Amino acid sequence: MANLLILNTTIPYPLHHTGNTVRVLPLSRELAKRHRCYLATFGEADERYRELAARHEYEDILLLPSFPTAHPWWRHFFWRTGNLIKRMHPGYYHECVTKLSAFADCHHIDLVLAHTMEVSEFAEELPVARKIVDVVDSRYLYLERRYTHPDPANSTLRGRLKAYRELARARYQESRLLYHFALATTVSARD
């Protein structure tokens, strides 16, 4: 029996809330049959959080502050990086990583399962030997399709530059995943 830390962008409850909860909650329930599962998620202590905590789906839940919504203007200069939270909001990033590290140490976490690319950068620095990232689907492939078949509303030079910047960031981040994670899972072979 291992201690697993499930790291997710949102509170995975109730099951029908989003596609993310459909992917995370049933997997957590299956893993809990053989392992002790802990959850770290971002958000507020709202009704969904209280209901999930009352159900005891996880051994313990760490609620981290919500993602910052305001971004500095100089974010546009980071063309080749996927770690935007780390670069744009270093104080927030280090606060979250510190809390996650303490949580992992407290519960003797053996494996981290990070759901989605958005939270993968938080898992990279955790002091846990084994890490898995569930990419779900390739953001690069999605953006590549959007870039090659542009929306007429984004046909301006500014729109094309923004699309190309996002494409470069996604390619860079996805190409470096296996430097930090033992395994990356997706929903299809193409992804």
Image: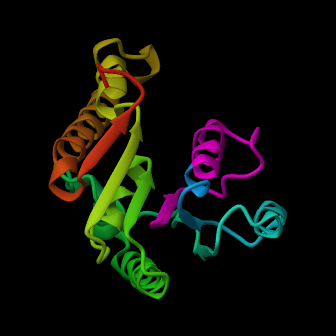
Tell me how the rendering is colored.
rainbow
Measuring 84% from the left and 64% from the top, which residue is drawn there? 47
Which sits in the foreground, 52 or 145?
Answer: 52
**Where 47 falls versus 150 (above or below)?**
below
Residue 106 horizontal/vertical position (percent): 47, 87
**Where 85 falls versus 149 (above or below)?**
below
Residue 162 horizontal/vertical position (percent): 31, 37
Q: Quadrant of residue 108?
A: bottom left
Q: How many marks?
A: 0
Measuring 43% from the left and 79% from the top, which residue is drawn there? 104
Measuring 65% from the left and 48% from the top, which residue is drawn there? 25
Residue 113 horizontal/vertical position (percent): 42, 56
Measuring 21% from the left and 55% from the top, which residue is drawn there? 78
**Where 144 falls versus 120 (above or below)?**
above
**Where 144 falls versus 171 (above or below)?**
above
Tell whether position 22 is magenta. Answer: yes
Q: Which residues are magenta?
A: 1-30
The quarter in which the C terminus is drawn is top left
Tell whether position 160 is magenta. Answer: no
Q: In the shown orientation, is residue 57 left or right of residue 31? A: right
Say whether residue 72 is visible: no
Residue 77 horizontal/vertical position (percent): 20, 55
Q: In the shown orientation, is residue 123 left or right of residue 14? A: left
Say whether residue 12 is visible: yes
